Image: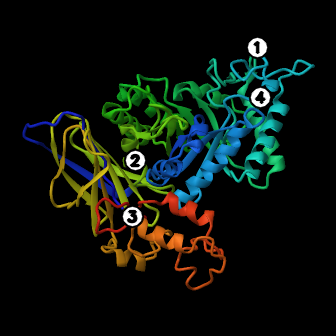
Amino acid sequence: MISVLLLILPQISTAQPLDAAGAVDTGTVYQELEGFGASGSHYENWLVAHPLKNEIYDVIFGQLGLDIYRIRNAYDILPEYIDRTAEIVQAAETSLGHPINIMITSGSPPDYLKSNGSTAGGTLKKDASGDYMYPEFAQWWADSLSDYTNHGINIEYVSVQNEPDWLAEWETCKFLPTETEDWAGYDQAFEAVYQELDSQMAELPKFLAPETMGFGGSQAFIDALIDPCHVYGFAHHLYTDGEYYNPDSFIPGMQNYATNYGYKPLFQTECSGNNDELDFNGAMTLAKHMHNSLVHEGVCSYLYWDLFWGDAGGLVAVEFPWQSDPDYIINQTYYAFKQYSAFTDPGWHRIAASTDNSDVRISAYISPDANEVSIVILNVDDTNINLTLSLTGFNPDSAKIYRTSETENCAYIGTFTPSQPLLLPAQSISTIRLRDWIFPDTCAAVLAAGYRLAPDITSDCYVNHLDLYYLIQNWLNTTCTAPDHCAGADLEPDGDVDLADFTQFAQNWLRCNTPEDPTCIPNW
């Protein structure tokens, strides 16, 4: 599958398009992707109480193609957060059709482990002997993972402290790379957690470190680690080392960081601008950051900060659920992120891509079976560009183009033909999705290939009122058996038609996957 992402800014140019050439070579392979993700650390109470939550779940997980869901460690701090997160994770897996990888980090340990007796500010507490409470911190982490597992939340990645180099009036806990009289040492805290989990767990999660405010600040923490072999990947945020609204200002530092620390997978685990910059200008800024991180630093994962947020913020803004007629807003940054996340998966690799125009920025990715490729192209010029794109080592049988601009939201705009120039509108985002096998071209072909949406009871590749009719006709029937399974209304199937079936149906409401309708989202 080849997906080409083209970034085009708000103004639509009337000038004669410029000519440019680009190339993609599947024979030159770079980093393996772990996936694209975002955080659900706050406002989860608004989400689970929202009357449109099932619709929102599908927007933020299935439609976005999210790979990693980043959560906070709230054990012994806010237990209800864990309950709500368990619901969200289950909904994510239902929407995606497979488990989602969970990344957990700590804003702060509980107040009884803090030097100031508060989850805000401070550092790790000292015991009666004057030693920092590293063993107790490690035990808290072990107990935390056990509790999350008991809630059905299986952790893939662990970061023992979010932004250890930052103090704030909210959940934070400052560490220095090594301890001093006034501040606990990250090196000993990390090692204590690793050793405790290693002694208790048959299979360890993947440890990330140090998740500092920026990549520059992470270097001292990495260099001080007691045993770097205990770290799976180096993680950082993108709040320092450059000016957010000038993404290219980060490039020299990214390249230097990759040279020194790229011997392990590199993770960008949190970044976002201001909540008043979620329009198309903000979307373009985000896309540039994603391109630069993937190409110049070589990150294996890029995570946005707030997947959902209250009122206006986040990729998706959730309105207060108890107000009259609450709704939600999909911000334009969502669609910029989707141009990457919806067209790649974990296990893909970045491959060589280049262009002769500095205003056209290309990155490309190939699937593990080499049957699909995604090419991401940013046009940061105010002029339309005709791009002649050559492909080496890949001969697609099918190609589709999706575009995001000031007026288009990851919209399907037609097919891509490698022998013809591709028009990149000024300041827009487009995705070309190519495969070297033939797409199913009818609903019947989709069903024959095994890509049916489970709640599509009527086998027309739509989940709508017709399917609801059969669900209602068989509601609370407890005698559903093979091969009919109550006319298909027993969706699990488990022998009856109940709330479990309705929940799965509701989460797919109005979805469609027929290639005969360009508004439908394929699930193959």
Q: Secondary structure at mark 4?
A: loop
* Label of residue 512 in the image: 3
Q: Residue at x 53, y 46 (%)?
A: 51
Residue 361's place in the image compared with 447, above or below, is above
**Cα distance in 3D space between marks 3 and 1:** 58 Å
Q: Residues within 10 Å of mark 2 (few under 14, many from 20)?
A: many
Find residue 184 and report its horizontal and vertical position in percent: 75, 22
Give the residue type that dot 3 points to.
Cys
Quarter placement of the C terminus: bottom left
- The residue lying toward the viewer, choosing from 453 and 220, is 453
Q: Secondary structure at mark 1?
A: loop
- Nearer the N terminus, badge 2 or badge 4? 4
**Cα distance in 3D space between marks 2 and 1:** 44 Å
Is residue 157 at all visible to an observer of this figure?
no
Give the residue type that dot 1 points to.
Asp
Instruction: Give the image quarter of residue 192.
Output: top right
* Label of residue 110 in the image: 4
Q: Residues within 10 Å of mark 3 (few under 14, many from 20)?
A: many
Residue found at the far right of this picture: 129
* Label of residue 341 in the image: none
* Label of residue 182 in the image: 1
Contact between labelled residues 4 and 2, with CB atoms less than 8 Å apart: no
Q: Secondary structure at mark 3?
A: loop
Is residue 286 at all visible to an observer of this figure?
yes
Find residue 136 and report its horizontal and vertical position in percent: 84, 32
Q: Residue at x 43, y 23 (%)?
A: 242
Instruction: Give the image quarter of residue 100.
Output: bottom right
- Nearer the N terminus, badge 3 or badge 4? 4
**Cα distance in 3D space between marks 1 and 4:** 19 Å
Quarter placement of the N terminus: bottom left
